[in-house]
Image (tube, rainbow, N blue to C red):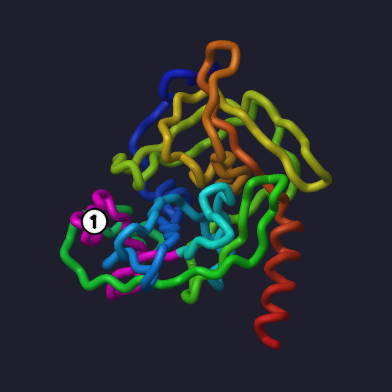
Amino acid sequence: MGSCASSGQSRELSNQEAQTFLKHVQIWVMSPKKGRASILRPPAGAEVDASLAVPISSDGYLLATAHGIPAHGVVLTLRDGENRPVYISLLDGKGPAEFQVVIPGSDGEGAAASTRTVAVKLKEQRLRVVKRFYASDLVLLKAPFRTPSYVKVLSSVPVPNEPVYFPSNPVLGEANALVLCPLDRVAITGISSWFIAVEHAARQGYSGTPMMNQDGELIALGVKSSLSSKHPVLWGSGLSKETLDEAMAIDRRHSRG
C-alpha cells in the first residue's frame, strides 16, 4: 500500500461506514477568568479551544487528547433538543454564530449520516475528567448522557502496514469523508500503550481525531502532526481496551458510592 503523504486516499463515507466512523463529539475547553463557563455566552477574557472526543462506551465515557484540557479548564459540549451532537463552525465573542447538527446513521433509526445547518435550541453540558494518562497524552471523560453509538477499542497492539482509517474533522468544517493511510510506524511505550504514525498532511485541529482499523476498532487518537524526513506525519496515541475498561470500572464503582 502506498504512502498518503499529501492528503491520503479520501472519499465520501458510505452509510455503513458513517455508522462506524462518525461517532466523535465536539468538546470545548474553557478557562474563564471570571464568571460562569459557557460556550453560548462566553465571559469576557475566557480562553476557548475546540477539540474532539470519542465515545468508547454506551454510558457516556469519552476518550480525548489531554494536551488541550488544562487542569483548571472546564470541559463542555453542546447537544440539540433531541440530544444529538452539535458542531460549531464559527464562534465569535458573543457565542456561536453558526453551528451544524451532525446525525450519524446509527443514532437516527438507520438513516444515512448527514450534516446540516439548522436553527435548534441548544443545551450545553459539562463533562467530568475521570483520569489522565499523562505518558499517552490522553484523558478519559464522563458525559452526563448516554452514548449508545460508541467505538470499540482495540485490545491488542496495532501492526505496521495495516490500513488506518480516520474521518475528516467536523471542527474544521470538512465534509463527511474517510481518509485511508497505511500504518507507517508503531512505537510501544508500555504494556498497554503505543504511539503510531501515518504519513499525512493533517492540518492543525486534528487532535482527538479517531484513527481506526478496517474493523472499526479504535487504534489511537490523533495527538500531533510533524515533519519527519521531509514527509508530513500524523501521530496518534493509543491505549488498550483492558486499560480503559479498568479505568471505567473503577469510576463506575466510585460513582455508585
> For residue 205, what is the image quadrant?
top left
Residue drawn at x 72%, y 39% is 194
Q: Can you name the residue that lies furthest to the bottom here?
A: 257
- Where, quadrant-wise, is the N terminus in this rendering? top right
Residue drawn at x 56%, y 40% is 223
Residue that carries the numbered disc 1 in the rendered image: 93
**Magenta span contains residue 93:** yes
Q: Position of residue 54 (x, y in %)?
A: 51, 55
117 up-or-down from 196: above or below: below
91 up-or-down from 72: above or below: above
> For residue 178, what is the image quadrant?
top left
Residue 108 seen in the figure: no
Q: Position of residue 4 (x, y in %)?
A: 48, 20
Q: Position of residue 7 (x, y in %)?
A: 41, 24
Left/right placement of residue 108 relative to residue 246 reads left
- Local SS, label 1: loop
Q: What kind of secondary structure does the magenta stretch mostly adopt?
A: strand
**Magenta span contains residue 16:** no
The stretch in magenta equals: 76-100
Q: Can you name the residue that lies furthest to the left here?
A: 119
* Residue type marked 1: Gly
Residue density around tag 1, few if under 14, some if 14–19, many if 20 or more, within 10 Å:
some
| Residue in front for this viewpoint, 252 or 132 | 132
Left/right placement of residue 232 relative to residue 22 reads right
Residue drawn at x 29%, y 54% is 88
Left/right placement of residue 171 relative to residue 190 reads left
> For residue 48, what is the image quadrant?
bottom left
- Where, quadrant-wise, is the C terminus in this rendering? bottom right
Residue 198 seen in the figure: yes
